[in-house]
Amino acid sequence: MKILPTDLKHYLSGDWSISGVVSQVDSLSQTLQNLEADQNKKLHVDCARINKIDMSGLQLLHVWRECASMRGIEARLVNLPEHMQQTIRQSGFEQHFADSNSDMSGGTE
């Protein structure tokens, strides 16, 4: 099934730590496969349901966003839980996710 709208929303949930990140790869891969790469699209990736994340999960999301970008898709993370924002700050990943969510600079989505 192809996803065609220009503004899409994808929901992430669960464990994005080193113990759970492997099970998240298939979902992200499937999302990219379902998107048409020939149109410039924005994908809002809702992170509100992520209950655990560490550096492994952040690295996966960063690489996945890069892959989406190569397909012409702007993947913007939204609704980052406080614990995820804290992990981003503590790991020094702010520069990789600063454009994703105004929550990182104290704003709201």
Image (spheres, rainbow, N blue to C red):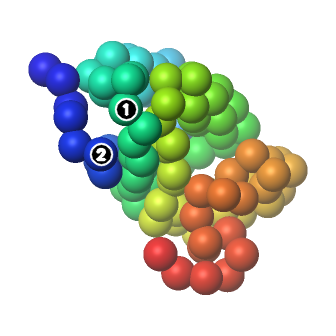
Q: Do the residues labelled 1 and 2 touch (CB within 8 Å)?
A: yes
Tag 1 residue:
39
- Tell me the SS state at disc 2: loop
As drawn, 20 above or below 87: above
**In the figure, is residue 83 to the left or right of 25?**
right
Please, what is the three-letter code of the amino acid marked with disc 1? Answer: Gln
Q: Position of residue 27 (x, y in %)?
A: 35, 25
Taking the image as shown, residue 104 lies to the left or right of residue 53, namely right
Q: Name the residue under label 2.
A: 6
At 57% across and 23% down in the image, what residue appears?
Answer: 70
Image vertical order of residue 13 relative to residue 19, above or below: below
Q: Is residue 3 left or right of residue 93?
A: left
Amino acid type, residue under disc 2 in the picture: Thr
Residue 96, horizontal then vertical, whole percent: 75, 46
Residue at image location 60% in from the left, 73% down from the top = 103
Q: Is residue 86 above or below residue 42?
A: below
Quarter of the image with the N terminus in it? top left
Residue 92 visible in the shown view: yes
Q: Nearer the viewer, residue 83 or 44?
A: 44
**Looking at the image, is 16 positioned above or below residue 66?**
below
